[in-house]
Amino acid sequence: MPIKTHHADIENRIRHTLITYGPLSAKKICFELNISQPVFSRNIKKLFPNIVIFGKSRATLYAHKRTIAGVTNKLPVYEISEIGKVTLLATLHPVEPKGFFIESTISKIHFKYFENLPYFLDDLRPSGFLGRLVAKQYDFLHHPQDISLWSDSDCLRFLSQYGWDMIGNYIIGDDALQSYLNKKTNIELLIKERERESRYENMAKHVLDMGPAGSSAAGEQPKFLAIKEPETPVIVKFSPPIKHAVSKRLADLLVCEHIAHTVLNDIGITATESQILTNNAKRVFLELKRFDRCKNGRIGVVSLQTLNLEFVGSTKSWSDVSESLYERGLISQGIHNNICFLDLFGRLIANTDRHLGNISFITKNLEILKLAPVYDMLPMSYIPQYEQMRTTTMEQPIITPRDLPYMTRAIDTAIKFWQDVHDNPLITMSFKKIASNNSKILEMINY
């Protein structure tokens, strides 16, 4: 049955149909409005330039452009190479009533419609502790202070104007690109090696002076971005001044994260390059080199969570989602094996925060090249909760049949981790005891 409408003319009826129902084929529009193809062809031309046409032949779809306040009706998406070359990756067209049409020479997204922000841009959304600081810093945009409530339109308004330094190597919009091209490394802003402790202390206080950064996951570490000599972008996590049990435990966990990086690198699994620093205020800093940045350019990154939402839709573990991606031919057997190993290793070091955003991949032109350096790998089971701390040893981990190919290597590496935690002079005596007991539990596993 054709759609009943109060519009007086066919042109307005076509417009109303597209605005209401989104992208449609000519055949579908003709059927819904009970009009002929020639009538449609004559009237669709009257709607130009407010119509977006994509696809070819019978697959051609028509959509009505959508206006987003503060955003142009078509947004270029740029990719920054490792040598700093800027390439137009795609053009983003917002369409009614929601979603985006992507125009690109990349075969994976060539003339494709997405109901939400395209998946490969999803990791650009402000998130976590730093994302909540963005919401406070750019409050003049009048977006919700809770970044989880930001719509696609809110994200695009921010990204197309101010999102020139987000994760990965994509930049949306000419304004953001211009900010990237205009940026000049101010030698006065570079942090000298010998000044890091004092400068980091001031930067930590500045972040904390901004006030609570919205609601956050329990125990999430505060952090800030910095650039140290010689032009090395870093993320710096920091503990409170070490005065009581909670702050000591948070400092312990920062050291544990650094130790996890070290033991993984030692066995050939690339982890984030990191360093522990302390200062006179007795605060502990964990300096993490950004793996999405290089000397002259940037490196593409996509998270396991983003790939899961687009291609799998699972709520299960790293290993489960990885297996689905491997079966779909999106990642290699080697990448899948490493993810399964890391999933098991995480269990063996009491990392209870193995959510899908904590594993990422290095990409180029949307192709997944390899696993990104490991990050956020630490015994989160021991994070203080509501000022209370877990002090007991972990339970003996359950080993599943899928773990068997990785078990020996993972247990040996986890034992080395707990031993190194115990031997580290920055670790408190109470956590050394936990580390020693956990090491003994793993040594008792029969493999």
Image: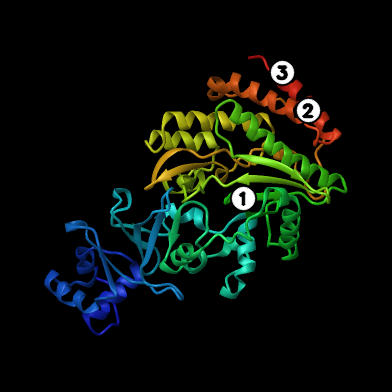
Name the residue rendered at 50%, 61% in the picture.
Answer: 164
> Label 3 near label 1: C-beta < 8 Å?
no
**Which sits in the foreground, 120 or 264?**
264
Can residue 320 be spotted in the picture? yes
Name the residue rendered at 75%, 31% in the picture.
Answer: 421
Seen in the picture, residue 156 relative to 352 is either above or below; the reply is below
Disc nearer the start of the sequence (3/2): 2
Q: How crowded is mark 1: few (under 14 residues within 10 Å), some or many (20 or more)?
A: few
Name the residue rendered at 54%, 44% in the picture.
Answer: 291
The spot of residue 243 in percent (x, y) is: 87, 48
Name the residue rendered at 43%, 53% in the picture.
Answer: 84
Q: How crowded is mark 3: few (under 14 residues within 10 Å), some or many (20 or more)?
A: some
Q: Which amino acid does label 2 sit on?
A: Asp
Q: Which amino acid does label 1 sit on?
A: Glu
**Which sits in the foreground, 412 or 96?**
412
The residue tagged 2 is: 423
- CA–CA distance in space, label 3 to label 2: 17 Å
Q: Is mark 3 on a helix, strand or loop?
A: helix
Quadrant containing the N terminus is bottom left
| Mark 1 or 2, closer to the camera | 1
The residue tagged 3 is: 443
Q: Is mark 1 on a helix, strand or loop?
A: loop
Q: Is mark 2 on a helix, strand or loop?
A: helix
Q: Which label number is shown at residue 229? A: 1
Q: In which quarter of the image is residue 409?
A: top right
